[in-house]
Image: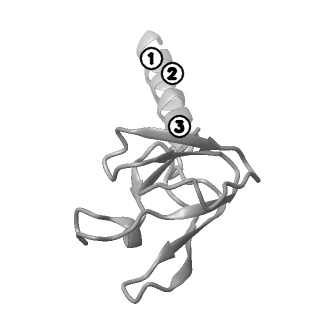
Amino acid sequence: MRLRAIVTAAAFAMTLVMAVPGQASAAAGGIFHYTYTNTDGVEMRGDLENPATNTCVTIPEADDVANPGAKPAHSPSNKTNVDAILFADVACDEAEFAVAVNGKGGSNLKFRAVRFDT
């Protein structure tokens, strides 16, 4: 009888563990807009759609490590559901400014990477 209770409890525990969904991939829902200057010197609009959270995300067009001479991005518009922390460098070491949900920054706000903090 005791063995039956142990087996039943173990089966119940296993069922409970399997019923709990795994952690979903963390992403900021929405779009983060920014302006960058292309190699011809023309200002363009860039977007990060549903970017990863708690991860340093390099702005590809502003990556001065991969593209020496690339200018920083500017004029952010945070249409995601989490705050965006902007960085002057691609390694996310030099925090510059936080842009709240639905917040914007002007053309003087220069950045090369962003992290969406949850």
| Residue found at x 23% / y 69% | 68
Q: Is residue 46 above or below residue 21?
A: below
Name of the residue lying farthest toward the right: 102
Q: CA distance from mark 1 to mark 2?
A: 5 Å
Q: Which numbered marker is on residue 39?
A: none
Q: Which numbered marker is on residue 15?
A: 3
The answer to whether marks 1 and 2 mark residues whose Cβ atoms lie closer than 8 Å is yes
How far across and down, in percent of the image, does residue 20 sit? Answer: 57, 39
The amino acid sitting under disc 3 is Thr
Secondary structure under tag 1 reads helix
Q: CA distance from mark 1 to mark 3?
A: 14 Å
| Residue found at x 52% / y 49% | 26
Q: How is the image coloured?
A: one colour
How far across and down, in percent of the image, does residue 56 sit? Answer: 40, 49
Q: Quadrant of the C terminus?
A: top right
The amino acid sitting under disc 2 is Ala
Q: Which numbered marker is on residue 9?
A: 2
Q: Residues within 10 Å of mark 1 (few under 14, many from 20)?
A: few
Residue with the mark numbered 1: 6
The amino acid sitting under disc 1 is Ile
Comparing 81 with 38, the one in front is: 38
Number of marks in the rendered image: 3
Comparing 20 with 56, the one in front is: 56
| Residue found at x 28% / y 70% | 69
Q: Is residue 69 left or right of residue 34?
A: left
Secondary structure under tag 2 reads helix
Q: Is residue 79 above or below residue 15?
A: below
How far across and down, in percent of the image, does residue 19 sit? Answer: 57, 42
